[in-house]
Image: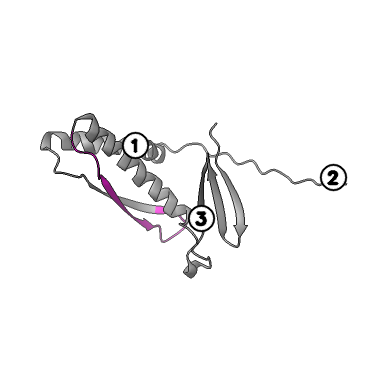
């Protein structure tokens, strides 16, 4: 199983360790944080957008279409009630050039089949183990 480690820094700030990469996460000032990084929800939406961009670039490159400069913009809306969750995500894909009509459906299908999107549609099981910190006397 792949592992990602999250370590508390201070207040609402955490450090996410992924392989040799370090990502700081926090809450915005208006939510009581120090805004030292994106929120976990922003990372969730960013993961979807980055995955979609990856699949779009691969699709275009695989068809010898210009792929350098693919851009995805992601907007999201939170559910106003309970449970707290992302209610809607809208992705805007901007290919580097106009894509021929015959390739548009394939591009949309490729982007729609990204791993993060598939994981949202068919949600993974989430298991939680709370480990006790028993001190030796």
Residue placed under numbered mark 3 in the picture: 25
- Determine if residue 101 is in view: yes
The residue at 51%/54% (across/down) is 24
Q: Position of residue 120 (x, y in %)?
A: 40, 41
Q: Is the residue under label 2 in contact with that under label 1 (CB below 8 Å)? A: no
- Determine if residue 83 is in view: no
Q: Which residues are magenta?
A: 65-86
The residue at 19%/30% (across/down) is 63
Is residue 26 on the magenta stretch?
Answer: no
Numbered tag placed on residue 136 in the rendering: 2
Q: Nearer the viewer, residue 93 or 121?
A: 93
Check disc 3 and report its element: helix, strand or loop.
Answer: strand
Neighbor class of circle 2 (other Cα within 10 Å; few <14, some 14-19, many 20+) is few
Q: For the residues marked 1 and 2, what is the alpha-carbon distance in whole angstroms?
A: 47 Å
Q: Position of residue 136 (x, y in %)?
A: 84, 45
Residue placed under numbered mark 1 in the picture: 114
Q: Is residue 66 above or below residue 14?
A: above
Check disc 1 and report its element: helix, strand or loop.
Answer: loop
Q: Is the residue under label 3 in contact with that under label 2 (CB below 8 Å)? A: no
Q: Nearer the viewer, mark 2 or mark 3?
A: 3
Q: Is residue 136 above or below residue 118?
A: below
Going from N to C along the chain, the mark reached first, 1 or 2, is 1
Q: Position of residue 57 (x, y in %)?
A: 27, 38
Can you tell which quarter of the image residue 105 is in?
top left
Q: Residue furthest left?
A: 101
Q: Position of residue 45 (x, y in %)?
A: 39, 50
Q: For the residues marked 3 and 1, what is the alpha-carbon distance in whole angstroms?
A: 24 Å
Going from N to C along the chain, the mark reached first, 3 or 1, is 3
Q: Is the residue under label 1 in contact with that under label 3 (CB below 8 Å)? A: no
């Amino acid at each position: 199983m792949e592992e990602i480690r999250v370590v508390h820094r201070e207040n609402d700030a955490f450090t996410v360790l992924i392989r040799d990469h370090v990502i700081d996460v926090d809450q915005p000032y208006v939510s009581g944080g120090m805004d030292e990084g994106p929120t976990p929800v922003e990372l969730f939406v960013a993961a979807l957008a980055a995955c979609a961009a990856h699949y779009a670039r691969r699709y275009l490159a695989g068809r010898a279409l210009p792929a350098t400069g693919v851009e995805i913009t992601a907007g999201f809306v939170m559910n106003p009630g309970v449970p707290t969750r992302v209610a809607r995500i809208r992705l805007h894909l901007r290919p580097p050039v106009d894509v021929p009509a015959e390739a548009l459906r394939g591009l949309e299908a490729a982007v729609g089949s990204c791993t993060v999107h598939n994981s949202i549609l068919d949600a993974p099981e989430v298991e939680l183990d709370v480990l006790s910190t028993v001190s030796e006397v």
